[in-house]
Structure formats: structure tokens, C-alpha cells
Amino acid sequence: MSLTKALKSGENEASFRSDSMIGHAGLVITAIPEGGYGEIRISAGGHVRKLSAKSALPVDAGQEVWVSSILSPTAVEVTPTTPELNA
């Protein structure tokens, strides 16, 4: 029974890391500095996960972002949903 549960869990994990996450909204929980990594929380496939996130622009904690690409099983590239306007 444990083996079956582990295999099913692995399937869910794999689908969560797939390209199907691209376009999903996430919430920044640790600010993303320019050229560095922060963290986001995302819900996909019925699971909530915390992932490392990189962005071309700095993003403050609490901002909503979109997943624009998958960098690794534990990291994504994101784009702010409301980019800051430079006057």
C-alpha cells in the first residue's frame, strides 16, 4: 500500500513540475531582487507549493506574478502581473 501511495505521489509531483505551470498565478512570499532569487507560493494541480523564483525585474513580497518558464523542478521564472511604472 505504501508503494502505491508513493507512486501516485510521484505522478502528482511530476505533473506539478510540468510546463502546465506556465501561466499560473503565484504570490511572492520572499521578495525577488534584481538578478537574484526569491520565493513564491503557487497552487497547481490541487497542490500548494513554495518555489524559488527569478524575475527580470525586482518584485516585492505580496505581489502577484505569472509563471513564465520552468528553470528546474524547484525554480521558476516569473513576470509581475502589474509591472511598476517608471515615471
Image (tube, rainbow, N blue to C red):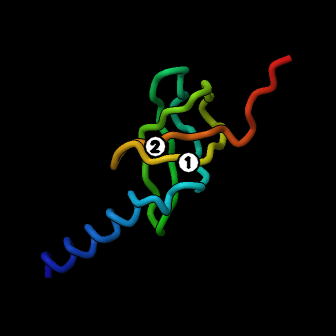
Q: Secondary structure at mark 2?
A: strand
Q: Position of residue 9 (x, y in %)?
A: 27, 70
In what quadrant of the picture does the N terminus appear? bottom left
Residue at 33% over, 49% down? 73
Q: Secondary structure at mark 1?
A: strand
Q: Are marks 2 and 1 in contact (CB under 8 Å)?
A: yes
Looking at the rendered structure, the kind of residue marked 2 is Val
Q: Residue at label 2? A: 76
Which numbered disc, 2 or 1, marks the residue that appears first in the sequence? 1
Tag 2: Cα neighbours inside 10 Å, few (<14), some, or many (≥20)? Answer: many
Q: Is residue 39 above or below residue 23?
A: above
| Res 81 label | none
Q: Quadrant of residue 74?
A: top left
In what quadrant of the picture does the C terminus appear? top right
Give the Cα separation between the discs numbered 2 and 1: 7 Å
Q: Quadrant of residue 12?
A: bottom left
| Res 67 label | 1
